[in-house]
Image (tube, rainbow, N blue to C red):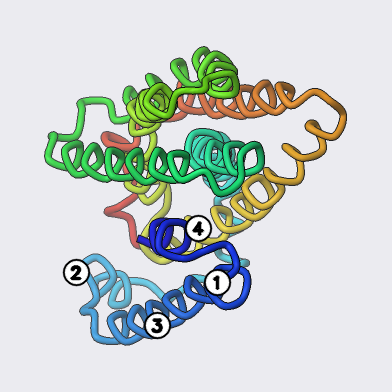
Amino acid sequence: MLLLLQKVFLTPEELKAWGWRIPFVIGAGLAIFAAVMRRNLHETEAFVEAKRLAKPTGSIRGLLKYPRELFLVVGLTAGGNRGVLYLHDLYADFREIVGRPHRRPDYLVIFGSLIFATLLHAALRRIERPHRPQAAADLFGVAGTLATIPILTTLKETKSPFTAFLLICAAWIFVAGYTSINAIVKAELFPTNVRALGVGLPYAITVSVFGGTAPAVALYFKSLGHEDWFYYYLSGMICLSLIIYATMRDTKHESAMHRHE
């Protein structure tokens, strides 16, 4: 919606003068809505039981008892979340906009691919969780490691908006292997009393470090005349996450969700 509003319905002059503020206004409104909604949410049975059985330890000190789990969240997030979403969504948008600013077909390609991703995730949510949930992530890791460089290389060279749309949608198909199960896998790593902090803190730090620096890294490689080095960087991040997926415990059958210590 914001993409169409800013790039289709507004002129470049309007966008520069005041249109760039629209996402911030909407974001502020959504933040207030989320805060009110969270205040009225009922605690789950697991958290109610945890409060009854154990003293709350949702602190950094309590979190440090789970260094392996913290490392797993960082590793899962580094390649799976911001690295890959920048790769197949934001970076695709970024490259197209930098290369051909204010080209309406490019924005429609990104908008259409996001609609496809939304429908894809809605469909995947209806599919029963696999016997070994990391298998979906393994598929993403293998496909992402092998296909990232060809997809972005082809995307860079293509002149056809339709081809660009197909490439980004193809990337979303295997990215969904990660996004469809990552939240529950991370939650199953921690007992109830430190789960929110155990997932949220390393996730936020990793997103800041790897996602926040992705544009700077991409522009640095571009300034050196080697834009394609960024593709190898992202492929390596996905490969790192693949190693973690393949070696970590099966969280479905060794879940910490029932533990309240």
220 left or right, relative to 193: right
* Numbered tag placed on residue 14 in the rendering: 1
Foreground label between 2 and 1 = 1
Determine which residue is flagged by label 2: 45
Disc 2 to disc 1, how far (Cα)?
50 Å
Q: Kindly state the secondary structure of the residue where label 3 is placed.
A: helix
239 left or right, relative to 164: right
Q: Kindly state the secondary structure of the residue where label 4 is placed.
A: helix
Determine which residue is flagged by label 3: 29
53 relative to 198, above or below: below
Query: Residue drawn 35% across and 29% down?
Result: 169
Quadrant, the C terminus = bottom left
Determine which residue is flagged by label 4: 198
Task: Name the quadrant containing residue 239.
Answer: top right
Residue type, mark 2 in image: Glu
Residue type, mark 3 in image: Gly
Foreground label between 3 and 1 = 1
The tag earlier along the polypeptide, 3 or 1, is: 1
Disc 4 to disc 2, how far (Cα)?
19 Å
The tag earlier along the polypeptide, 2 or 1, is: 1
Query: Residue drawn 20% across and 36% down?
Result: 124
